[in-house]
Image (spheres, rainbow, N blue to C red):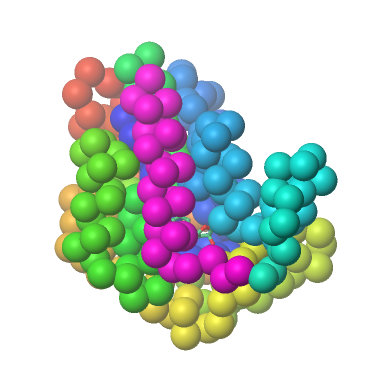
């Protein structure tokens, strides 16, 4: 079974993804936790370039691999962002297929829906192009279940800022304005409305324990109905 978590910044996905993987394992389901962009060494390198381009270029230059490139002198174009995300996804999907073939439940923190929501609804790139690249990168691999953790952008940003003050990661996309995150949220909700059988929309303003419980209920139902699996112990 392939489960993805989606949502805007500060929705608490990453925490919930860890908790879900732990709970699956405790219930006897081997679970592999992964994330996008990333999930493999090469995809992780693309992630660094995407989210922290200046630091990545500086690090490459320090090893003589980016001579003559002045960090910050070049804007990362939206279309390049989409292509890099898609390239990272292609690398990652090859591994996801292996994990699934080995009988693991794959829990992935963001996947192709993120490109539709961020690059499509957020950046305004053509959705047809995004869907074409998605099919090239994924070869048609779709999640069985997608948990959309929905939170208003103001609350998400507030949480992100708090985490940043405590030393948490802050990336290029976190720095986008409220209108961008509002478009991304609306994009996600539209995706969920279009595929109600795959998506479960959850209120991510709930306390983390309550949210984790709602996630577990949704996943348990999904596992019970997946072919060849048995309901987890509660
Ligand atoms: P990350 O630090 O993992 O953010 P979060 O904890 O909110 O998931 O950074 C991933 C960033 O990449 C996030 O801002 C969303 C963005 N992203 C896209 O824009 N498109 C995509 O297809 C994916 C997978 C991520």
Range drawn in magenta = 74-98
Side of 114 where 213 appears, left or right: right
Whole-percent x, y for residue 79 in the image: 39, 64
Question: Which quadrant is the C terminus positioned in?
Answer: top left
Among all residues in the image, which is located at the extreme top?
102
Q: Position of residue 107 (x, y in %)?
A: 44, 36
| 149 with respect to 75 (left or right) | left
Q: In percent of the image, x 74 and y 69: which residue is there?
A: 162
Residue 64 to residue 170: above or below: above
Q: Quadrant of residue 157?
A: bottom right
What residue appears at the point 28 percent right and 59 percent down from the top-left corner? 130
Instruction: Out of 160 and 150, give the one closest to the viewer.
Output: 160
Task: Name the dominant secondary structure of the magenta segment.
Answer: helix
**Which quarter of the image is occupied by the N terminus?**
top left
- Up-down: is 55 above or below 122? above
Who's the residue at 37% across and 38% down the image?
A: 90
Pick the front one: 47 or 210: 47
**Residue at the location (69% across, 58% down)?**
69
């Amino acid at each position: 079974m392939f489960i993805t978590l989606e949502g805007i910044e500060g929705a608490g996905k990453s925490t919930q993804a860890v908790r879900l993987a732990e709970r699956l394992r405790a219930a006897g389901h081997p679970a592999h936790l992964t994330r996008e962009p990333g999930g493999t060494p090469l995809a992780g390198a693309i992630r660094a370039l995407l989210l922290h381009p200046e630091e990545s270029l500086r690090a490459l230059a320090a090893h003589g691999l980016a001579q003559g490139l002045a960090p910050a002198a070049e804007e990362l174009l939206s279309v390049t962002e989409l292509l890099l995300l898609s390239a990272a996804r292609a690398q990652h999907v090859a591994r996801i297929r292996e994990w699934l073939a080995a009988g693991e439940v794959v829990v992935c923190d963001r996947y192709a829906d993120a490109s539709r929501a961020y690059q499509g609804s957020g950046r305004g790139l053509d959705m047809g192009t995004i869907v074409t690249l998605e099919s090239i990168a994924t070869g048609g691999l779709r999640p069985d279940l997608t948990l959309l953790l929905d939170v208003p952008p103001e609350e998400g940003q507030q949480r992100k800022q708090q985490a940043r003050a405590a030393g948490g990661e802050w990336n290029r996309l976190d720095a986008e304005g409220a209108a961008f995150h509002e478009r991304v949220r609306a994009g996600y909700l539209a995706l969920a409305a279009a595929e109600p059988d795959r998506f479960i929309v959850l209120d991510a303003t709930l306390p983390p324990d309550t949210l984790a419980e709602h996630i577990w209920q949704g996943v348990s139902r999904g596992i019970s109905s997946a072919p060849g699996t048995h309901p987890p112990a509660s």
